[in-house]
């Protein structure tokens, strides 16, 4: 009887899930199609935002970039997808038959409902992987074996993102999306150190100590042949295009970096793990004694020496 009950529950759950996803797609696709009508007149990247499966408006931004670059079936590696229910590559599977290598440390990734719902539509390869600077090259090599080429690279691991990116072979990648940390300001080129087994809440309960500044990514990717196009409205993800295609975005107005560190999301946590709903201000007593690395000089600083002056 219990086995039958579980089977019935799973059938109902799957049926409801499928219905819900198809409804989201129907509504989301309508918004995307309406947005596409104005792609020729876009002034700022944020004007193309549409949220379907992404956390914010990245679904719309990526659709715009694919349209401008004429990528009909993008090949994507996304590092840090969670269980794939809320990530940046998922919508492109449904809308553009994208081939995706989805990477996360979560062991439940391969069996998640989101993966199961999308996997039959195209090439979707979940990889259980804790990305770090030591295995980054093998990870990108494995992804290239699966995808042949990589059109879009997305990194969002809430940790040592910069050190992972620095080790990757970016050859022929057209678009790079990186999550950055607005708490570190825009001018400084800094990152948390290249910790092993990094966990943002292990080092500070707020969760605000992670990743790298926008300046760090901007400096590195500019030297690697990529042009900054802008960020999402919440100032969490930055978008870069291979400089080979810069001329396709000549009409786009690039926001100054200082305007891209104005994070509006109030997701800080208290000492017991509860949401505090604080704004971006953190006192020196709370945060200032943690270490940062200047990603250009490789000098070590304290957060109080850089962040609080930004």
Image (spheres, rainbow, N blue to C red):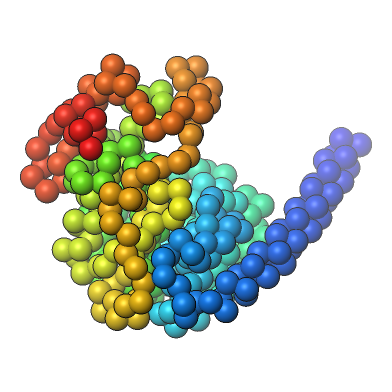
Identity of the residue drawn at 71% across and 64% down: 27
In this rendering, would 47 be left or right of 294? right
Q: In this view, does 293 lie to the left or right of 269?
A: left
Q: Say if residue 70 shows up in the picture.
A: yes
Q: What is the x, y in percent for residue 264?
A: 45, 41
Give the number of callouts. 0
Q: Residue 239, how many percent across, how many down?
A: 36, 61
Q: Is residue 69 left or right of residue 244?
A: right
Q: Image point 29% across, 81% down: which residue?
A: 247
Q: For this rendering, which residue is in front, 38 or 193?
A: 38
Q: Is residue 116 above or below residue 245?
A: above
Whether residue 103 is visible here, answered yes or no, is: no
x and y percent of residue 198 in the render?
33, 34
Q: Residue at the right extreme?
A: 1
Residue in the picture at 28% in, 49% down: 258
* Residue 103 pos. (x, y %): 45, 54
Q: Nearer the viewer, residue 94 or 212?
A: 212
Quadrant where the C terminus is found in the figure:
top left
For the residue pair 262 and 151, the one nearer the viewer reads as 262
Quarter placement of the N terminus: top right
Answer with left or right where residue 155 lies relative to residue 108: left
Residue plotted at (15% across, 41% down): 294
């Amino acid at each position: 009887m219990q086995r039958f009950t579980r089977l019935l529950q799973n059938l109902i759950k799957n049926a409801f899930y499928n219905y819900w996803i198809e409804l989201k797609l129907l509504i989301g696709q309508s918004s995307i199609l309406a947005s596409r009508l104005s792609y020729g007149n876009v002034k700022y990247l944020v004007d193309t935002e549409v949220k379907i499966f992404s956390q914010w408006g990245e679904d719309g931004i990526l659709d715009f970039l694919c349209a401008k670059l004429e990528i009909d079936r993008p090949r994507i590696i996304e590092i840090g997808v969670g269980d794939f229910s809320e990530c940046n590559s998922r919508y492109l599977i449904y809308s553009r038959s994208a081939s995706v290598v989805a990477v996360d440390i979560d062991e439940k990734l391969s069996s998640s409902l989101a993966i199961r719902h999308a996997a039959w539509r195209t090439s979707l390869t979940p990889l259980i992987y804790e990305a770090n600077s030591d295995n980054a090259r093998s990870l990108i090599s494995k992804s290239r074996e699966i995808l042949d080429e990589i059109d879009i690279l997305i990194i969002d691991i809430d940790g040592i993102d910069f050190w992972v990116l620095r080790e990757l072979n970016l050859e022929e990648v057209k678009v790079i999306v990186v999550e950055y940390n607005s708490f570190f300001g825009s001018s400084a080129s800094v990152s948390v150190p290249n910790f092993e087994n990094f966990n943002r809440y292990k080092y500070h309960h707020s969760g605000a100590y992670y990743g790298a500044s926008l300046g760090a990514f901007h400096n590195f990717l500019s030297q690697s042949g990529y042009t900054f196009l802008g960020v999402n409205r919440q100032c969490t993800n930055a978008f870069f295009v291979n400089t080979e295609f810069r001329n396709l975005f000549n009409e786009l107005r690039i926001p100054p970096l200082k305007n891209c560190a104005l994070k509006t999301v109030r997701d800080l946590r208290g000492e017991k793990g509860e949401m505090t709903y604080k704004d971006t201000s953190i006192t020196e007593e709370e945060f200032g004694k943690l270490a940062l690395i200047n990603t250009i000089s490789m000098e070590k600083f304290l957060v109080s020496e850089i962040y609080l002056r930004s």
